[in-house]
Image (spheres, grey):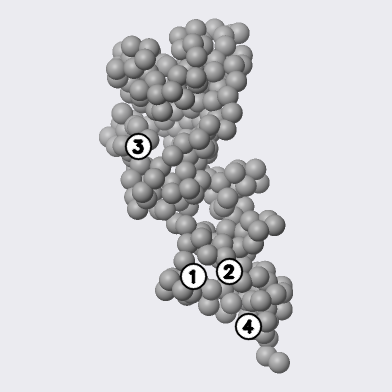
């Protein structure tokens, strides 16, 4: 019996996805079924699946199977007034954020520096997941000084957006004072959170939001799926590393 090369299996599955025979969210056949279908060994099937997963075409979910990945290739504009709902564009119908957890902590040194706080200051630390059509595209942390913004997380839950929450404190406008970004290979925990192949990259964005007079009001650190979101910088000076 002639052995089928793993790349033949990979290309066949990729064609099925490209022509719509396998649609986003569909579960693809199991390793055993694919091995029988292509008269190939399990090792060749695993290598084929791993390669198309690395390309972001499928997601392998332990205990559930392998699914055709939904590919919302989104554009995110980073500018002076970056706002998630306004700045994120692409072929999606729903962009949502969910709270993963929140706590009051002593501000780490990087947060103290970014927000110009004294050592020992307390901040609210909120962790959120951002999804596009139920596909995770980013997750990370936002920090606010508790003296300046008491009960920020609770108010954010009531008002539904950061902009509306700031208004409850009398802040009607704020700007992006600083953004730093860089890409690197995803860590195992990051790939798991974003439901992406561990060989795919992530983009790390750290940002400081400030009042128009330059007073910092928030510091954030967010891990973005680099294969699902493309970033553009609009006219401001940003640091890249």
Disc 2 or disc 4, which is closer to the eye? 2
**Element under label 4?**
helix
Q: Which residue is mark 3?
A: 85
**Element under label 2?**
loop
**Element under label 3?**
helix
Q: Which residue is mark 1?
A: 22
> How far apart, in angstroms, are the residues tagged by discs 2 and 4?
14 Å
Q: Residue at x 61, y 71 (%)?
A: 29
Q: Which residue is mark 2?
A: 28
Q: Quadrant of the N terminus?
A: bottom right
> How far apart, in angstroms, are the residues tagged by discs 4 and 1?
17 Å
Badge 4 or badge 1: first in the primary sequence: 1
210 displayed left or right of 126: left
When the figure is inspected, residue 134 is found, relative to residue 25, above or below; the finding is above
When the figure is inspected, residue 240 is found, relative to residue 143, above or below; the finding is below
Towards the viewer: 116 or 28: 28
Q: Which residue is mark 4?
A: 38
Residues marked 3 and 2 touching at CB (< 8 Å): no
Badge 3 or badge 4: first in the primary sequence: 4
> How far apart, in angstroms, are the residues tagged by discs 1 and 2?
8 Å
Q: Residue at x 33, y 45 (%)?
A: 89
Q: Residues within 10 Å of mark 3 (few under 14, many from 20)?
A: few
Rendered location of residue 240, percent (x, y)? 44, 36
Disc 4 or disc 1, which is closer to the eye? 1
When the figure is inspected, residue 183 is found, relative to residue 9, above or below; the finding is above
Q: Residue at x 50, y 21 (%)?
A: 153
**Residue farthest to the left?**
235
> How far apart, in angstroms, are the residues tagged by discs 3 and 4?
45 Å
**Numbered badge on residue 43:** none
């Amino acid at each position: 019996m002639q052995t089928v090369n793993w790349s033949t299996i990979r290309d066949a599955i990729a064609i099925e996805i490209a022509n719509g025979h396998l649609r986003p969210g569909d579960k693809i056949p199991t390793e055993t079924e694919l091995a029988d279908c292509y008269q190939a060994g399990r090792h060749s099937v695993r290598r084929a699946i791993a390669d198309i997963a690395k390309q972001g075409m499928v997601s392998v979910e332990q205990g559930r199977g392998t699914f055709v990945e939904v590919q919302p290739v989104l554009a995110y504009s980073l500018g002076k007034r970056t706002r998630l709902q306004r700045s994120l564009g692409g072929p999606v119908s729903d962009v949502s954020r969910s709270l993963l957890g929140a706590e009051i902590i002593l501000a780490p040194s990087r947060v103290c520096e970014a927000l110009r706080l004294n050592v020992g200051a307390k901040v609210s630390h909120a962790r959120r997941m951002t999804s596009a059509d139920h596909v995770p595209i980013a997750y990370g942390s936002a920090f606010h000084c508790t003296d300046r913004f008491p009960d920020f997380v609770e108010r954010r839950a009531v008002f539904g957006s950061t902009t509306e929450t700031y208004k409850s404190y009398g802040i009607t406008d704020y700007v992006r004072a600083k953004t730093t970004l860089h890409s690197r290979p995803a860590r195992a925990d990051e790939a798991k959170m974003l439901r992406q192949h561990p060989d795919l990259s992530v983009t790390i964005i750290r940002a400081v939001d400030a009042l128009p007079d330059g007073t910092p009001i928030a510091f954030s650190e967010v891990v973005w799926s680099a294969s699902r979101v493309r970033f553009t910088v609009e006219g401001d000076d940003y640091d890249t590393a």
